[in-house]
Image: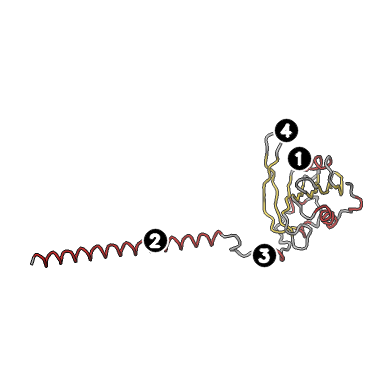
Amino acid sequence: MIVGLIVAIVVVLAAILFLGKDNGSSSNNATESNTESTIGLTEEQSTPGSTSSPSPGGLQADGSLDSTYVDGLPPQLSEFLTACSKAQFELQYEDGSSPNRMMDGMQCSGTSGSPFFMQKVDLVNDKEYANEVALRENVSDAVIASDTPTNFAGYSAGPAPTLFIANRESGRVLEVENFFGGEQKAREALQALGYNMADSVG
């Protein structure tokens, strides 16, 4: 009788322990499943390219260029730029004469078939910076396509090859830093923007 009671108690305890362990395993599996699902969803939402975007071969002018930033610059820019967004650029005073400050502008991509295809184009509206560009490039070994107060343009090889256009009167500046293709491609780009490269200096 006593032996039978002990066996019954052991069986009951074993059953309780088994059920408890099984429930714990089920709970852990559910947590892991939910965690994996949440992580997967987060990664999918933040993965670059998960939203639809035009292919590089189909980038056309899309009207995103704010004409405010190209006042006094070559009119062809409206056909050559796309995917423009507002941006700010820091003007740094290396001599410490003034505190660094921010300048309003835009950053665009080049349209397919344009001289700026697959390149980033910076546009700035700031008279002080427009004058600074002219001063800086005039003392460098830059190729100068035009040198007037309303139309200073050219290409500077240097450590960071840069194509530039500055209108010192309107304060508008275009710069393509790290312009790839070398001087020949830069000359072709400036030619496409209406500059007579046969008269260029440098």
- The span from disc 2 to disc 1 (Cα, nearest Å) is 60 Å
Residue ID for mark 4: 95
Q: Out of 6 and 160, give the one closest to the viewer.
A: 6
Name the front one of labels 3 and 1.
3
Residue ID for mark 3: 54
Residue ID for mark 2: 31
Q: Out of 70 and 154, give the one closest to the viewer.
A: 154
Q: Which mark is residue 128?
A: 1
Q: Earlier along the polypeptide chain: callout 2 or callout 1?
A: 2
Name the front one of labels 2 and 3.
2
Q: Earlier along the polypeptide chain: callout 4 or callout 2?
A: 2
At label 2, which amino acid type do we have? Answer: Thr
The outermost residue toward the top is 97
Q: Quadrant of residue 22?
A: bottom left
Name the front one of labels 1 and 4.
4
- Give the image location of residue 168, x and y in percent: 81, 43
